[in-house]
């Protein structure tokens, strides 16, 4: 059991993790009865936190935007500084914390007081960042998607495919995945009735959240590996599997996840799955890895192509 003060802080924290909470769920999490939850909500309201209640069987509690930012109680300047810093980190400026920053920004913007929003927007509009290694993605789009993933809400959005054709999509979002250069959304496409990996920079405008949905079984246990496979080999007509005489850690440092999926075999070798639209440049790409390799699977004629190129280089050095 929690003490009253500790329970109030924990209640605040829970109210921020989801948009709506049934009273029975909150009572179960905090190990109290529903009447205690009602009393604690009244205490939070008396402290200035706008907790909205919906009556009925399907009712519950929702934390609205108020004058303070629970549970840290940041002042105005601190709140603006945190929001701007998270937006900057979410855009990929600070390596390694992009996904965490998006989740934190989604929480913060949910309860940011209305009087502070123009200040955050003005700072964002007046700031220019040097372009990084990948296409830029608006932090507002990321936070809308992150919130929909968290709340299990369908998204409607415009999307441009690789050929430039514009389509309208309706999808059940599962997770955002960042490769270091690009953001991807793993979602169940309602129209295609299958899982799809969407490049977020190809989403036009701001997605619109809709009805709640019951989460489906994910397409894979390891979503990072799933996305790597989807974007590095699946989209291409030619598929290759190569066994490389180097550890997975060493090879992965040379091959970005958008170019190949690295699977460890043992501490001295690994397997790389990749794809290509045109096979002519692939032999030279493989040579750049700097390690011996064996082709395990390849399109017809590719091994003969490698042999011809090897003989040509052998003749070149006498």
Image (spheres, rainbow, N blue to C red):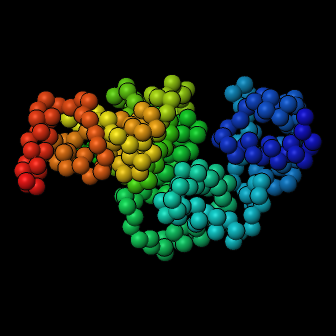
Q: Name, please, the residue furthest toward the bottom.
A: 126
Q: Name, please, the residue furthest toward the right.
A: 3
Q: Position of residue 232 (x, y in %)?
A: 32, 41
Residue ID at (12%, 39%)? 307
Residue ID at (28%, 39%)? 293
The answer, for residue 15, to whether it is visible in the render is yes
For the residue pair 274 and 151, the one nearer the viewer reads as 274
Check the image and report above or below for 143 versus 22: below
Q: Quadrant of the N terminus?
A: top right
> How many numbered badges does the structure rendering display?
0
The answer, for residue 168, to whether it is visible in the render is no
Q: Name, please, the residue furthest toward the front.
A: 318
Check the image and report above or below for 57 versus 307: above
Q: Position of residue 72 (x, y in %)?
A: 77, 58
In this picture, residue 313 sits left or right of residue 48: left
Q: Position of residue 272 (x, y in %)?
A: 34, 38
In this picture, residue 80 sits left or right of residue 190: right
Quarter of the rendering containing residue 311: top left
Quarter of the rendering containing residue 235: top left
Quarter of the rendering containing residue 233: top left
Residue ID at (41%, 71%)? 130
For the residue pair 230 and 210, the one nearer the viewer reads as 230
Q: Position of residue 37 (x, y in %)?
A: 85, 36
For the residue pair 31 and 317, the one nearer the viewer reads as 317
Check the image and report above or below for 299 versus 318: above
């Amino acid at each position: 059991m929690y003490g009253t003060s500790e329970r109030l802080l924990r209640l605040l924290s829970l109210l921020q993790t989801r948009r709506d909470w049934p009273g029975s769920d909150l009572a179960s999490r905090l190990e109290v009865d529903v009447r205690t939850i009602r009393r604690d909500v009244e205490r939070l309201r008396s402290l200035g936190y706008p907790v909205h209640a919906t009556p009925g069987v399907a009712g519950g509690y929702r934390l609205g935007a108020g004058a303070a930012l629970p549970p840290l109680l940041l002042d105005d300047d601190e709140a603006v500084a945190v929001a701007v810093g998270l937006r900057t980190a979410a855009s990929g400026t600070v390596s390694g914390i992009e996904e965490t920053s998006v989740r934190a920004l989604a929480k913060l913007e949910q309860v940011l007081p209305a009087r502070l929003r123009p200040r955050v927007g003005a700072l964002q509009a007046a700031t220019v960042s040097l372009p990084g290694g990948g296409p830029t993605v608006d932090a507002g789009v990321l936070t809308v998607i992150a919130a929909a993933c968290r709340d299990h809400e369908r998204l409607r959005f415009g999307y441009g495919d690789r050929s430039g054709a514009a389509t309208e999509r309706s999808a059940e979002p599962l997770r955002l995945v960042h490769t270091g250069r690009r953001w991807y959304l793993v979602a169940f496409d309602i129209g295609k009735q299958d899982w799809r990996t969407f490049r977020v920079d190809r989403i036009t405008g701001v997605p619109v959240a809709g009805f709640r949905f019951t989460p489906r079984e994910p397409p894979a246990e390891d979503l990072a590996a799933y996305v790597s496979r989807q974007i590095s080999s699946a989209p291409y007509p030619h598929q290759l599997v190569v066994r490389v005489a180097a550890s997975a850690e060493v090879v992965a440092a040379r091959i970005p996840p958008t170019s190949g999926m690295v699977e460890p075999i043992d501490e001295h070798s690994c397997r790389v799955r990749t794809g290509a639209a045109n096979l002519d440049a692939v032999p030279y790409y493989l040579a750049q890895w700097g390690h011996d390799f064996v082709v395990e699977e390849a399109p017809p004629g590719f091994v003969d192509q490698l042999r011809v190129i090897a003989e040509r280089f052998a003749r070149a050095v006498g």
